[in-house]
């Protein structure tokens, strides 16, 4: 043998194979994500917070290639700072989502990341935008990442209009827990961010505090 | 962004379907959608029944290549009826599942078929068995399969409870199939359900317009 081959994960792309979700309630939004970052079959970070602030009351949830997603978030963070100085007040959530969409669309062939943008502004309250592949849609809730396929049925069945803040938080935690149980690329802890007109609250829910289901 | 390929794009195999089986207090429900599609672009049948009866109280759903599955089931049916004559009693559900498993395992290089087997026998009552592609046989309380099943893992994990009543289980199965058909473009049509208990077998067909609707429909 000629020598030791390097471990496989060094040559694999680092992906945030993930589960992310954002949901709007009357007066704000709740965002949630898991915390696993994988490179092929290895978990390279088991506590990564994929909910990234774009502004005080606007956050985005990262999925896809970790490097691409982080870069887009940092660029938009900078662009939003400049924009908010220009207009002299806090930016609208739609503006943040549009900036993300512009980058995702322009570089759609080179990038492989999906960011869900959610936040609160004075004009339209809580809003959630999906920016998959360069489209921009406002939705009552959005799920993304590899784990989201497993919970489409669950969110379709359980979502109701007019849920309050506590119900939304429970909905997000349940959805994340179910996805993390089934998707090999999602796991670790659950991060939650709740944004309303009073402020932004970040929370971590550790593995053993997540809801369990009949087969656990 | 993780790309998801429906199974039909992998090795040219058609799995465009959603199948499910669940045990309740006193019996088992097994069901499927009714769409047969060619490559996700053309629906060749809107009303195909994918729940096959292999004996009086034992039913199967197929996943994977439909041609392989049909061939295996045909062979399994004849094995089972011979076995039942030899034993002078109805076959056990595990016997039916084992027959399928033997065929899948011994011919694993040529076949691409998996099965859900559900039934009732006097020895162990209601049972559900899964025979996967390579020929593994396991027993479960609730199980789902086919391309549409990815979308309802979360729903099934959250909503299945052991020892439900017959009505609750039927509603659970109908909801799960409806949700999968709503998200998977190669599953659809009507929901075919079969309820098997010690007392008998009942077919329930839920047409498209009677399927439960969810918030965005």
Image: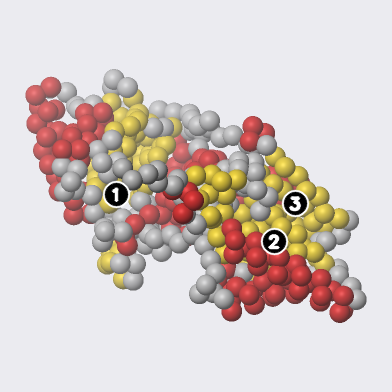
User: Which element is circle 1 on?
Assistant: strand
Residue of label 1: B63
In this view of the protein, which residue sits in the foreground, A159 or A120?
A120
> How far is mark 3 from mark 2, CA to CA?
10 Å
> Residue B126, percent across and down?
35, 29
Residue A92 vs residue B53: left or right? right
Crowd tier of the residue under label 1, counting other residues whose Cα lies within 10 Å: few below 14, some 14–19, many 20 or above? many
- Do residues under tags 3 and 2 come within 8 Å of each other at their CB atoms? no
> How far is mark 1 from mark 3, CA to CA?
41 Å
Please give the name of the residue rendered at 66% of the width and 53% of the height, measured from the top-left corner: A50
User: Which element is circle 2 on?
Assistant: strand
- Do residues under tags 2 and 1 come within 8 Å of each other at their CB atoms? no
> Residue B127, percent across and down?
34, 30
Residue of label 2: A60
Residue of label 3: A193
Q: Is A13 drawn above or below residue B168 in the view shown?
A: below
Residue A157 vs residue A11: left or right? right
Disc 1: which chain?
A: B
């Amino acid at each position: 043998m000629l020598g030791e081959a390097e471990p496989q994960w060094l040559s694999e792309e680092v992906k945030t194979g993930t589960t992310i979700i954002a949901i709007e309630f009357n007066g704000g939004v709740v965002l949630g994500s898991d915390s696993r970052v994988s490179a092929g079959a290895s978990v390279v970070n088991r506590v990564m917070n994929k909910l990234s602030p774009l502004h005080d009351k606007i956050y985005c949830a990262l999925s896809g290639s970790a490097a691409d997603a982080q870069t887009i978030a940092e660029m938009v963070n900078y662009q939003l700072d400049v924009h908010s100085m220009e207009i002299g007040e806090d930016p609208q959530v739609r503006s943040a989502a549009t900036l993300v969409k512009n980058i995702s669309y322009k570089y759609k062939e080179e990038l492989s990341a999906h960011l869900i943008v959610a936040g609160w502004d004075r004009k339209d309250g809580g809003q959630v935008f999906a920016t998959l592949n360069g489209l921009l849609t406002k939705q009552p809730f959005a799920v993304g990442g590899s784990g989201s396929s497993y919970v489409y049925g669950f969110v379709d069945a359980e979502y109701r209009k007019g849920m309050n803040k506590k119900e939304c938080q429970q909905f997000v935690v349940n959805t994340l827990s179910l996805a993390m149980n089934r998707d090999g690329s999602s796991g670790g802890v659950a991060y939650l961010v709740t944004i309303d007109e009073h402020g932004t609250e970040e929370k971590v829910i550790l593995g053993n505090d997540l809801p369990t289901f009949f087969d656990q | 962004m993780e790309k998801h390929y429906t199974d039909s794009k992998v090795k040219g195999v058609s799995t465009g379907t959603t199948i499910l089986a669940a045990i309740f207090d006193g019996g088992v429900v097994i069901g499927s959608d009714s769409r047969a599609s060619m490559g996700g672009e053309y629906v060749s049948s809107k009303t195909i029944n994918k729940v096959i009866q292999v004996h009086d109280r034992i039913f199967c759903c197929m996943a994977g290549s439909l041609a392989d599955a049909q061939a295996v089931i045909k062979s399994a049916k004849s094995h089972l009826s011979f076995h039942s004559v030899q034993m002078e009693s109805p076959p056990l559900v595990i016997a039916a599942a084992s027959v399928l498993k033997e065929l899948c395992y011994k011919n694993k290089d040529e076949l691409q078929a998996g099965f859900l087997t559900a039934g009732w026998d006097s020895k162990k009552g209601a049972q559900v068995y899964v025979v996967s592609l390579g020929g593994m046989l396991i027993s479960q309380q609730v199980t789902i399969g086919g391309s549409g099943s990815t979308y309802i893992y979360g729903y099934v994990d959250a909503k299945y409870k052991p020892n439900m009543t017959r009505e609750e289980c039927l509603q659970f199965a109908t909801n799960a199939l409806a949700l999968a058909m709503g998200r998977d473009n190669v599953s659809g049509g009507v929901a075919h359900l079969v309820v098997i208990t010690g007392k008998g077998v009942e077919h329930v067909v839920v047409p498209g317009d009677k399927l439960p609707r969810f918030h965005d429909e």
